Image (cartoon, rainbow, N blue to C red):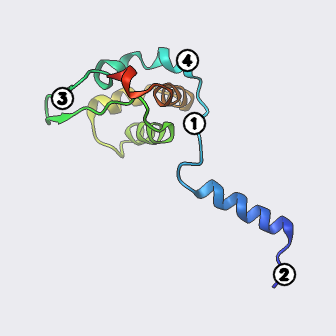
Amino acid sequence: MKITRSAALTALALLMLGLPGLATAEGDISAGRDKAYTCMGCHAVNGYRNAYPSYRVPKLGGQHAEYIVLALKAYKAGDRQHDTMQALASTLSEQDMEDIAAYFASAGQEESE
């Protein structure tokens, strides 16, 4: 079976698009810094715990942008359950999510601690 160069390149491109971690958020870090102001009240407090149910609130500085975008989309769609996060995510556009994710991805753990 002979595979053409075009078919091989197409297959390689499709494979790369499907690999986790290769896609990147296309957000604006500066805009994300402003938009993430509300997020910082919980996700930048050292040792912060949610009152009920009780759990440690994750720090977002240094987190992968793709993960943050996927999480925000899931909250907005109702696929992830947390009343506050669902309410906040429901107000965000996709660009807002990308900007916030770019900001947190660019911020090291030390910045958000």
* Element under disc 3: strand
Crowding around mark 4 (Cα neighbors within 10 Å: few <14, some 14 to 19, many 20+) is some
Q: Disc 2 or disc 4, which is closer to the eye? A: 2
* Element under disc 1: loop
Q: Amino acid at mark 4?
A: Ala
Query: To which residue does mark 2 refer?
Result: 2
Query: To which residue does mark 4 refer?
Result: 31
* The C terminus - image quarter: top left
Crowding around mark 2 (Cα neighbors within 10 Å: few <14, some 14 to 19, many 20+) is few
Q: Amino acid at mark 2?
A: Lys
* Residue farthest toward the front in the current orientation of the protein: 110
Query: To which residue does mark 3 refer?
Result: 49
Sequence-wise, which precedes: disc 1 or disc 4? 1
User: Who is closer to the viewer here, 65 or 97?
Assistant: 65
Q: Are marks 2 and 4 in contact (CB under 8 Å)?
A: no
Q: Amino acid at mark 1?
A: Ala
Crowding around mark 1 (Cα neighbors within 10 Å: few <14, some 14 to 19, many 20+) is many
- Residue 23 is situated, as x and y percent measured from the top left of the image, at 59, 45
Question: Is residue 3 at all visible to an observer of this figure?
Answer: yes
Sequence-wise, which precedes: disc 3 or disc 1? 1
Task: Report the Cα–Cα distance between label 2 and label 4.
Answer: 49 Å
- Residue 30 is situated, as x and y percent measured from the top left of the image, at 56, 17
Question: Is residue 39 at all visible to an observer of this figure?
Answer: no
* Element under disc 4: helix
Task: Report the Cα–Cα distance between label 2 and label 3.
Answer: 59 Å
* Marker disc for residue 25: 1
Displayed quadrant of residue 7 = bottom right
Q: Amino acid at mark 3?
A: Arg
Sequence-wise, which precedes: disc 2 or disc 4? 2
